Amino acid sequence: MNEINNDIKRLSFVIPAMDEQDTLEELALQIMSVVDGMNKGYEVEIIFIDDGSKDSSWSVMNRLSEEYQGRVFALRMRRNFGKAVALDAGFRQSTGEIIFTMDADLQDDPIEIPRFLESLESGYDLVSGWKRRRHDPLSKTLPSRVFNKVTALTTGVPLHDFNCGYKAYRREVIESVRIYGELHRYIPVLAHDVGFRIGEIEVQHHPRQHGVSKYGLERYVRGLLDLITVLATTRWLHKPGHLFGGLGVLSGLAGGSILTYLASLWVLGLGPIGDRPLLLFGVMLCILSVQMISIGLIGELFVRSTKLRDISELTVSSTSNINNEKDDG
């Protein structure tokens, strides 16, 4: 890629695409038109990533990269690895100080670019789009609303639309987080966890004119599983005892209540309890409680030993530096 002119701020647009041959050229032209029209010392690079397309998307990307050399670039994945992997490949190739991500289907409108930049200039490190009025069927919008509510509640990041692919980042954000699997929708959560400021703006959402959606209801199942991963690696990373211990306590309370109830029936002579499935269930919950609490304690011991080792290494380094300074004196 071309060297960066320090007098000009470069905007990188990382756009994964799969079977979007009819929209790529129009999207590139719209982006360049908007950025060129701002006349504020910005230059643009558009990075298209072909994520296993079976149509002519790669041919279109190649033609655009030749026609707009230095402004449009094309990457090709060997097969469909998913949006997160495609985005990560694009991030690693980008050179801009500010990085945009957007979908390739023309449902995201490039006219919103100046508003994203204004929000970043106001102090935010990451600005996420909010498709408040979506032109999608209820089968997509309803699960999305539930998913967004659950994610905002559990992570503490007050965004309305985690699924919106239209986002703008300062480069430091991209360099501080690593995405894989389906974690691309949780970049705001990962960034918030390391102290970046997260903002949100409403964006226009256009009806799809070409192609078909590549996502179904299964993405919400994968998304919820990844939400558990994100919570474990952010909120509970340094306190596993709270996570596993809390689950163990809940399991123990449930199992203890069941066994107390059955014991009361036996004492009052209200029938045998040895052949009741509820007895086995209560015992299993109590065993699970002990296991979860034990896992939590082991996790705490591991985290504590790691922290002590890190502190020891820092102390040795500091002592060495002090001794070197004394020798130099």
Image (tube, rainbow, N blue to C red):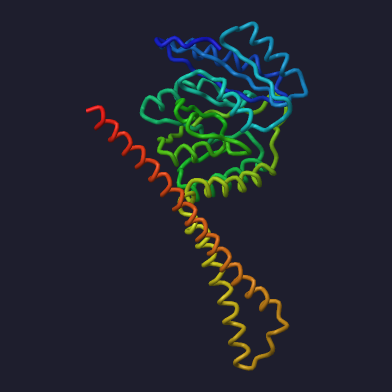
Residue at image position (73%, 14%) is 59
Q: Determine whether 259 is above or below 329 in the image.
A: below
Report how many numbered discs are placed on residues in the image: 0
Residue 183 spot, x, y in % from top left: 58, 38
Residue 273 lies in what quarter of the image?
bottom right
Q: Determine whether 32 is above or below 193 in the image.
A: above
Q: Determine whether 184 is above or below 155 in the image.
A: above
Q: Nearer the viewer, residue 147 or 325?
A: 325
- Which residue sits furthest left? 329
Residue 242 spot, x, y in % from top left: 47, 58
Residue 165 lies in what quarter of the image?
top right
Residue 108 spot, x, y in % from top left: 58, 26
- Which residue sits furthest bottom? 269
Q: Nearer the viewer, residue 151 or 14?
A: 14
Residue at image position (63%, 38%) is 181
Residue 119 spot, x, y in % from top left: 41, 27
Residue 50 lies in what quarter of the image?
top right
Quadrant location of the C terminus in the rendered image: top left
Residue at image position (36%, 27%) is 122
Q: Nearer the viewer, residue 99 or 88?
A: 88
Quadrant location of the N terminus in the rendered image: top right
Q: Nearer the viewer, residue 269 or 27?
A: 269
Q: Is residue 54 toward the left or the right of residue 4 in the image?
A: right
- Which residue sits furthest front? 327
Residue at image position (51%, 57%) is 243
Q: Is residue 107 toward the left or the right of residue 308 in the image?
A: right
